[in-house]
Image: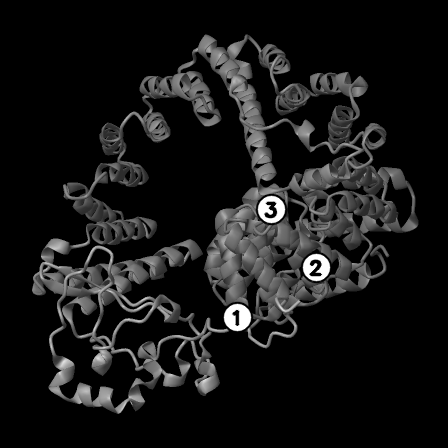
Amino acid sequence: MEHVHLAALDEEDLYSGYNDYNPTFDTEELENDAAFQQALRTSHGRRPPVTAKIPSTAAGTRSFGNMAARAPLSSSMGRPATGAISDGISVARPMTAVRAAGYSSSAYRGSAFDPLGQSRGPAAPLETKNEDTPEEKVKNLEKTVNELIEESCIANGRGDLQLALEKAKEAGRKERMLVRQREQSASADHINLDLTYSVLFNLASQYAANDMYAEALNTYQVIVKNKMFNNAGRLKVNMANIYFKQRNYPKAIKFYRMALDQISSSHKEMRIKIMQNIGVVFVKMGQYSDAITSFEHIMSESPNLKTSFNLILCYFAIGDREKMKKSFQKLIMVPLGIDEDDKYIPPNDDAHMNLVIEAIKNDPLRQMERERKAMAERFIMTAAKLIAPAIETSFAAGYDWCVEMVKASQYVELANDLEINKAITYLRQRDFNQAVETLKMFEKKDSRVKSAAATNLSFLYFLENDFGLADRYADLAMIADRYNPAALTNKGNCVFARCDYEKAAEFYKEALRNDSSFTEALYNLGLTYKKLNRLEEALDYFLKLHAIMRNNAQVMYQIANLYETLEDLPQAIEWLMQLISVSPTDPQALAKLGDLYDSEGDKSQAFQYYYESFRYFPSNIEGIEWLGAYYIDTQFCEKAIQYFERAALIQPTQVKWRLMVASCYRRSGNYQKALETYKDIHRKFPENIECLRFLVRLCTDMGLKEVQEYATRLKKIEKQKEIREQRVKSGRDGSARGRREGSAGSENGQNCHVSSAKGERMSSKLKMLPGVNDPYETSPNKDIDASYVDPLGPQIERPKTAARKRVEEDEFADEELGDDLLPE
């Protein structure tokens, strides 16, 4: 048992000694070692190292301050430093660490744990760069140039072309300063060619964007002629594009071909695009054979929709029927490169897949596919409509051939659309029966095609004012497709024609619920509310329509008309001004604008717009009437004559215009011409009482012998008129009276009675003109035709002769007799 040693009774630590090491290697206490510090301060510390040869198995010693003479310790106390002799020179080997970083027992002697040396304080500040050095100046200039190029490109992307050009010019100036700086610093060999190329290319692009074609071409020439720029020959495509915009087609082709020579055959897509540009230029020049050569080459290498369509146009231009057919077949065989729509149909059992399909159903890639497919369908439909009348003896046979070709292709659904277009072509040719027959063939088709055909049929019958059949086919279209906004709009039109405006508004609203941007329904709904006198709601709908169709003149006119009805004349004038900016030659809009300014009391502006309206539409009676009245009002009767003469040419049976011409002659003092005019009027309208009265007055004043003759005729005609009015008053022979008045109106030309609303009266502008004190213009007899009111102002009062007094006394006597004979 005495040999048994219990671990629990043993006070010796099994792990002791591992942290013990020879104090020779204790570098932390060297600062307190006086001998070591003395050796550092004297030459003893600067003695050359002791050289020794290393035995094969022995470890050498290393001098370490004043402890260099100490003997190496045994391995149990640590390992001493070792050294090596190389060519007689002692080479010190690095000392092997005897403790891990931060894990020494010195922590017990008061040293803190600081592996990162943070106790030594912050690091010294870095030295500032000297920006005055040539290298720093060059770097700063390069950075500035790159920033200016980037800002120029961003401004161009925003559409601010002027700012983009200014930034490009500034980049060019900075780049030239950079080149001079390099030359001054003797580093011209290190010129950045890529930066120079970027500056010039951006500058040329901005010149072209700002339509400064000469400057752009000069800049491109600088790049192209510099042999140090790699692949600069491709920029000849840009130069050719500029020549194309300038309509310099020969030079454009020259540069396109030069660019084509610069591009290797490995860049197939780029070469195809240049060949397509060459073909388009040949089309512009009318050289269709050369264009066909380019397009045929592209179709053999890489067929695409645009090239195929252009090829059809070229063959149509030269009238080659067979080639048109072959090209149409190539067009419908061009691969679209898009997936089928089946992949967007979600499966019912996979919820995760349903979410994925819902996410990609309308993503940008899907939208691009739809756009490409819509473009292909548009090309096919346009090409079919173009070549159908040319490839066969009749357009119907041509359409039939196109339909057969389309049915055998991937565009099967377009066949029905082509048939409908065939019916529309019949409409354009005024062959309504064939159009109706063609559309009736779709009554047994699927719902979409049936609805489209019935919609067109309803439209046809509505144009022919056959509202019954139009209503019937509108109902058929709605039954086939209740969500067809065109069918609902046609139904609303039929109801509108029956004056059931409330119900029509409901159909228009339903069409808008199915398609909120359906412009026909919006316009018709505005008209419906206008009929219902709900002007504010009508205005709202027309404003919504204006937001969709910014430049539609009809919408602007309706808005202006509503503002006028709401008595907001400034807004009405503002909208009419917008209408004039869109359609500056519309005479009705110009006349309306003049009328509004006249209502505002601005005669000068009204005259300007009425005159513009007359210049574009010289046959507008209302404009002629206003202009004549304006010149009379401003005492320029000579100028008013030409307008009333034109009105007499337009309405030769209206005596009032000739009477106005004669009045203008009298007003201007040309009594002889006035007398001749009145005589001419009397020859053409012998029963016109007003003309005879003026003839009596003029002959009396001028002392002519014909005065008695005209006075006798005047009395006779007045008596006849009194007799007719007495018969009307008594009510005898009413039907005979109607026939006599109709025949009399056609024989004597007095159409100013009640023929129309405009023929009953002169304009209010003429009636308001002064004419009360003029003895020639005012007749006291109430049986003068009420449709004529002479607009002339007062004349210089002249003394009356005895004969003239007698005539006036007779007229007043006639007035007393005639008061009892006028019809109520």
Report x, y in % for residue 481.
81, 32
The numbered mark at residue 682 is 3
Whether residues under marks 1 and 2 lie with C-beta atoms below 8 angstroms apart, the answer is no
Residue shown at 14% from the left, 88% from the top: 42
Which residue does the numbered mark 2 point to in the structure image?
A: 562
Q: Dot 3: within a 10 Å radius of its alpha carbon, few (fewer than 14), some, or many (20 or more) residues?
A: some
Asked whether the viewer can see residue 796, the reply is: yes
Q: Earlier in the sequence, mark 1 or mark 2?
A: 1
Name the residue beneath numbered marker 1.
Answer: 15
Quadrant of residue 250 within the rendered picture: top left
Q: Nearer the viewer, mark 3 or mark 2?
A: 2
In the visual, does 658 lie left or right of 272?
Answer: right
Which secondary structure lies at badge 2? Answer: helix
In-front residue for pair 424/370 = 370
Q: In the image, residue 19 lies at what x, y percent?
A: 45, 74
Q: Tell me where residue 163 appears, x and y as whole percent.
A: 35, 62
Query: Looking at the picture, which amino acid does disc 1 mark?
Result: Tyr
Which residue lies at the image location 55% right of the left edge and 16% below the top edge?
388
Give the image's coloring scheme.
Answer: one colour
Circle 2 Cα neighbour tier, 10 Å, few/some/many (<14 / 14–19 / ≥20): many
Q: Residue at x 57, y 48 (%)?
A: 620
Mark 1 surroundings: few (<14), some (14-19) or many (≥20) residues within 10 A: few
Q: Amino acid at mark 3?
A: His
